[in-house]
Amino acid sequence: MIEQSQRRIPMPVAVAAVLLLVGAVIPASMMFANGPSVATGLIGVLLLLALAYGLWRGSGRARFWTTVFSTVSVGYGVVTITEAGGLGLLQIVAAAVIVGLLLVPASSRRWFHDLPAEG
């Protein structure tokens, strides 16, 4: 039997982290194009990058805060759905997918609770 020194990140968690990274790129590009508040945009981008890194490392706090921010984003998007354009709808769907990927699959739950893989 081959011993692995590092655990492999589950696919749902990897997809959620990549979605956060893509979510950080979009505001960063918009911030430099026409953003009046560069500091606020930079803080948001850094927060998304930190959350993606935390998910990749298996941090339970990163999972918690990502779930909270994504749920708030979905709620805010639903409340302001009449003003949401195509990018707003994409943000709502992406946030809902992130929440689902972090909470539903058993592999995601094991990743954050440091439980051994079944098998």
Image (cartoon, helix red, strand yellow):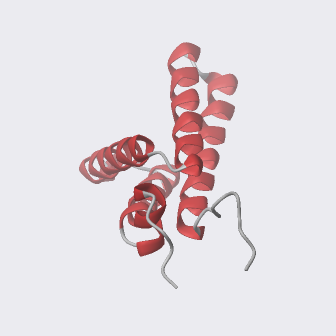
Asked if residue 1 lies left or right of residue 16, the reply is right
The vertical placement of 106 against 89, above or below, is below
- The outermost residue toward the front is 1
Residue placed most toward the observer, 90 or 63: 63
Q: Residue at x 44, y 42 (%)?
A: 62
State the residue lying farthest toward the bottom: 119
Location of residue 12 in the rendering, given as x and y in whole percent from the top left corner: 53, 67
Residue displayed at 66% across by 40% down: 25
Identify which residue, 84 or 19, lies in the foreground. 19
Q: Would you say 87 lies left or right of 4 here?
A: left
Q: State whether residue 35 is above or below residue 107.
A: above
Q: Residue 3's spot in the image, x, y percent?
A: 71, 69
Eyeballing the image, is 83 above or below 37? Answer: below
Q: Nearer the viewer, residue 9 or 69?
A: 9
Residue drawn 59% across and 36% down?
49
What count of labels does the image hold? Answer: 0
User: In the displayed structure, does residue 83 sit left or right of residue 58?
Assistant: left
The quarter holding residue 78 reads bottom left
Residue 83 horizontal side relative to residue 55, left or right = left
Residue found at x 61% / y 60%: 14
Q: Residue furthest right?
A: 2
The percent position of residue 42, horizontal first and vertical second, equals: 58, 22
- From the viewer's side, name the closer residue of 82 and 72: 72
Split into 4 quadrants, where in the image is the N terminus?
Answer: bottom right
- Is 110 situated above or below 55? below
Q: Residue 73 location, x and y as percent?
A: 35, 46
